[in-house]
Amino acid sequence: MNKRSDKPETPLYRSHLIPVHDTVELLSGKWKIEIICSLTFGKKFFMELKRDVIGISPRMLSKELQELEVNGIITRLPLATKPITVSYELSEYGKTLVPVIHIMGAWGRNHRKKIIGSLKVN
Amino acid sequence: MNKRSDKPETPLYRSHLIPVHDTVELLSGKWKIEIICSLTFGKKFFMELKRDVIGISPRMLSKELQELEVNGIITRLPLATKPITVSYELSEYGKTLVPVIHIMGAWGRNHRKKIIGSLKVN
DNA sequence: CGGCATCCAATTCGATACTG
DNA sequence: CAGTATCGAATTGGATGCCG
């Protein structure tokens, strides 16, 4: 206990709620983070993503890619091959989201340790 | 374009997926962020929270508070009044989550600006 | 007052089949 | 190959009433 104050130094004002929700919702889809993860390693074809993201159906992959695209996180690059192929990549803007995800992951990793530790009393 | 590399300096490895998901899911409930926001201003009674979080039903408030409690984010403090009253506060551990939320909010605020800007072509 | 049980509405997700 | 359409299952959230 090195602190007695009840309040954190940085309260969360109501004006912050919407932006935080935006970020949470953008990442809330069941497969979004995994898709972004795969794309941090470079450009991928639809089919490669489907192989990377184990268990995803084409329906969900398509849907979540569209959501990421309208948010500017990824760029869709259709190629005039035969049959058509489409590759996706993280946009420069999308890359600004990666550090945020890392910070969330760091907290989550620590949280996992804490929760598992708190179960050892079983 | 000050960079030519396709890959971000910090890829997201698959080992990061679960911890990131943990953090997202912890914040994914419809009212969780707002509850945490309210509690960053100090201890609150159940009833006060219900007034603060406009539109929430007692059922949802109770449910989300429980989820935050089992995750160690908040502390439940029942008082032996008549009738019983219960107050909630952010735990010291829960306060470690606040900076993460702030970072998510900062990204989201910028994202909002970007998205709204991209609609001005309407 | 705090919170649980029940029931219903809405949203999300999965499986599968189909098209250009 | 890269999606879309359709259907059904599962999850999530809301309204309400009851109880200690």
Image (tube, coloured by chain):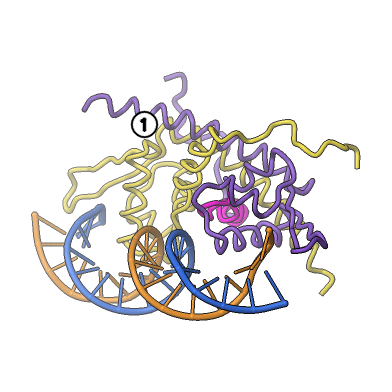
Chain colours: A purple, B yellow, C blue, D orange
Callout 1 amino acid: Ile
Could you tell me which secondary element the residue under label 1 belongs to? helix
Quadrant where the C terminus of chain A is found in the figure: top left
A33 in the magenta segment: no
Quadrant where the N terminus of chain A is found in the figure: top left
Residue plotted at (75% across, 63% down):
A84
Instruction: Name the side, left or right, on which B94 lies relative to C7.
Output: right
Image quadrant of residue A75? bottom right
The disc numbered 1 marks a residue on which chain? A
Q: Which residue lies most toward the top here?
A: A2
Q: Which residue lies most toward the front here?
A: A82
Picture coordinates of residue B88, whole percent (x, y): 34, 43
> In the rendered picture of this protein, how many numbered marks are placed on residues?
1
Residue plotted at (67% across, 55% down):
A46
Q: 10 Å neighbourhood of mark 1: few (<14), some, or many (≥20)?
A: few
Magenta stretch in the rendered image: A17-32
Picture coordinates of residue B53, whole percent (x, y): 44, 59
Image quadrant of residue B5? top right
C4 or B86, nearer to the observer: C4
Tag 1 residue: A115
Picture coordinates of residue D16, whole percent (x, y): 25, 76
Give the dominant element type of the magenta stretch: helix, strand or loop. Answer: helix
Picture coordinates of residue B83, whole percent (x, y): 17, 53
Instruction: Name the side, left or right, on which A53 lies relative to D18.
Output: right
Q: Is residue A84 above or below residue A53?
A: below
Residue plotted at (53% across, 53% down):
A28
